[in-house]
Image (cartoon, helix red, strand yellow):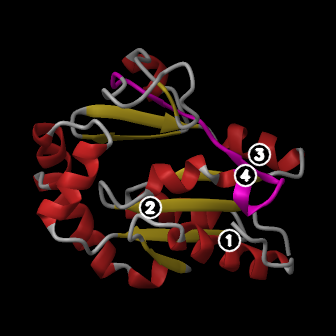
Amino acid sequence: MMIDLVIITGASGSGKSYLLSNFQYFGATFAVVKKKTTREPRTHENPNTNFEFTFDCPKEEVLNCEYHYEFRNELYGFNCSDIDALRMRDQTPMIIIRQTNEIKIMKEKYRNVIVVLCKCNWEDEKLIEHFQEKGISKQECQKRLFSHDEKKIKAEYAKNLKLFDLVLENNFDHTFLIQAKFFFDKKNGGSHAQF
C-alpha cells in the first residue's frame, strides 16, 4: 500500500530537518512539502536552497493556508493541495509538523500516514557543542532547546505516544538515516540500500 504522507516531528535539535533534507535516500518517490512561514531564515539556513520553507511570507499569506499554526511568535502554514499535487504525481509527500493536534488532523484526512518521531538523548551541553560546530550560536541553541514551547511540545509527545509509527534515535551519525531507510524499505517492500 502506498504511503499517503510522511510526517516528521520532534523537539528542536532532534534531526527533523536533517532527515527531511535526506529524503532522496528513502527512494525516488519521496518529495518534500514546502511550508510558508513569517519567520526569517536562521543564520545557518540559506533561503535560496532551503527545501523546507518559503521564508518572510506576509502574515495574511500564511493565515490563508488551509492549515496554519503559531510557534514562537511566528506563523507556519501549508495547504493540502500541495500534498495532493505530489500524490497525483505518484510521489510520497514528507512534511515536518510539530503540533500533535495538526498531526491528528492529517491522520484523519489521509488514509496511510506514517508519523516519525525524531529523538536525541544527548546531554544538553553536548548537544549545544554539536550545533555550535555547525555555526549556530550558543545563545540561539539555548533559545531553541530550552524554551517553554519545547517543554510543552515534549510533554505533548509523551502523552501521545500511540501517534508515532517510528521513533528514530539520533546520535548524529549515519545510523540515524539507516534506521529510517530500513523502515521505509520495509514499508515499501523494497530492498535495503546501503549508505
> Residue 84: which disc?
3
Viewer-closest of 73 and 53: 53
Distance between the Cα atoms at labels 2 and 1?
A: 17 Å
Q: Residues within 10 Å of mark 2 (few under 14, many from 20)?
A: many
Closer to the chain start, of discs 3 and 2, is 2
Disc 3 to disc 1: CB gap under 8 Å:
no
Viewer-closest of 135 and 81: 135
Q: Secondary structure at mark 2?
A: strand
Q: Amino acid at mark 4?
A: Gln
Magenta residues span: 24-40
Closer to the chain start, of discs 2 and 1, is 2
Residue at 46% x, 85% y is 162
Closer to the chain start, of discs 3 and 1, is 3
> Residue 24: which disc?
4
Q: Amino acid at mark 1?
A: Lys
Distance between the Cα atoms at labels 3 and 4?
A: 19 Å
Viewer-closest of 26 and 76: 26
